[in-house]
Image (spheres, grey):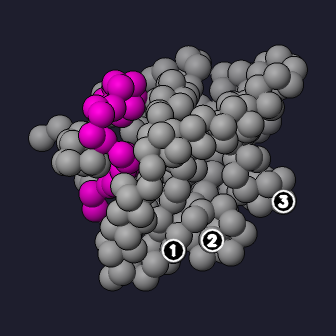
């Protein structure tokens, strides 16, 4: 069975993460499939794209088993997230369970997030000796603001969906049993709206939020690269895979 299932039903393009046995952790095959789904131009009858996930967890981030083998390479997730952000139609994430690390970024790169009250959002990178790139940190700051981002990154603790809804980080929240119906209502509202208006509005928002891309950040990129190549990063990923407490040495 495919790990990512992309379908078009009427006005809705749906992308389903279908690797529940691995908490929908994103490997290279999945990243390429999601990027492909959002790189193709939508048909004239399409109005909205939806990202869902099978199982109890929305997405646990990058597959650490695979990532540990390519730890010195740049993060492979950014082209996929960029494709979602720049997709011409509104993209809705329906988050039924935890969205962590790359899964958190996946949700926040969508235009609207409809989340279950059972879901948590987090960036536990410091717990495995990693740091987000400029591209990923910029999206967090755009979406959540510096106080919440400090809590997510420096403490590495997941925040409840209700908390992020109260802060205006995610757009809709529902009890688990009501998630499907609330998401359906959001999707139907988008379908009913004028498609040219939606496309123009999304382009305006993406352009306005891209201002941080012009900020010089070469020095920050170098810091992140040092973190990615550090012994602590290797230790952190190994410890997470072995389900033990990491021993960080600052090197």
**Foreground label between 1 and 3:** 1
Question: In which quadrant of the rendered image does the N terminus lie?
Answer: top left
Residue 250 at x, y percent in the picture:
79, 36
Q: Residues within 10 Å of mark 2 (few under 14, many from 20)?
A: some
Label 2: state its secondary structure: helix
Instruction: Kindly identify which residue carries mark 3.
Output: 147
Give residue 165's mark: 2
Q: Residue at x 53, y 44 (%)?
A: 197
Give the total of numbered labels. 3
Q: Secondary structure at mark 3?
A: helix
User: Can you give x and y, in whole percent of width and height, for residue 152 in the image?
Assistant: 71, 57
> Left or right: 10 with respect to 87?
left
- CB under 8 Å between discs 2 and 1: yes
**Foreground: 21 or 34?**
34
In the rendered image, residue 117, in percent from the top left (x then y), is placed at 49, 77
Mark 1 or mark 3: name the one nearer the start of the chain: 3
- Residue 173 is inside the magenta segment: no
Crowd tier of the residue under label 1, counting other residues whose Cα lies within 10 Å: few below 14, some 14–19, many 20 or above: many
Q: Which residue is mark 1?
A: 173
Q: Is residue 38 magenta?
A: yes
Span highlighted in magenta in the image: 32-55
On the picture, is 185 further left or further right than 204?
Answer: left
Q: Can residue 32 be seen by looking at this rendering?
A: no
- Spatial distance from mark 3 to mark 2, Cα to Cα? 15 Å
Residue 195 horizontal/vertical position (percent): 43, 44
């Amino acid at each position: 069975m495919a790990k990512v299932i992309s379908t078009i039903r009427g006005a809705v393009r749906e992308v389903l993460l279908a690797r529940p046995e691995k908490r929908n952790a994103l490997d290279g095959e999945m990243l390429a499939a999601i990027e492909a789904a959002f790189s193709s131009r939508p048909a004239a009858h399409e109005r909205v794209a939806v990202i869902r996930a099978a199982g109890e967890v929305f997405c646990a981030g990058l597959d650490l088993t695979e990532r540990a083998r390519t730890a010195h390479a740049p993060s492979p997730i950014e082209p996929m997230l960029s494709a979602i952000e720049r997709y011409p139609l509104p993209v809705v994430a329906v988050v039924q369970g935890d969205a962590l690390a790359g899964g958190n970024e996946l949700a926040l790169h969508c235009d609207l997030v409809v989340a279950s009250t059972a879901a948590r959002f987090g960036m536990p990178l410091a717990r495995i000796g990693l740091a987000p790139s400029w591209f990923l940190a910029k999206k967090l700051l755009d979406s959540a603001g510096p106080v919440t981002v400090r809590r997510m990154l420096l403490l590495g603790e997941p925040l409840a969906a209700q908390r992020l809804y109260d802060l205006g980080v995610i757009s809709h929240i529902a009890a688990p049993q009501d998630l499907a119906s609330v998401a359906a209502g959001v999707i139907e509202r988008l379908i009913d709206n004028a498609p040219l208006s939606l496309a123009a509005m999304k382009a305006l928002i993406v352009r306005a939020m891209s201002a941080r891309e012009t900020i010089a950040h070469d020095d920050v990129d170098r810091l992140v690269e040092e973190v990615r190549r550090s012994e602590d990063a290797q230790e952190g990923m190994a410890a997470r895979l072995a389900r033990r407490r990491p021993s960080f040495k600052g090197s």
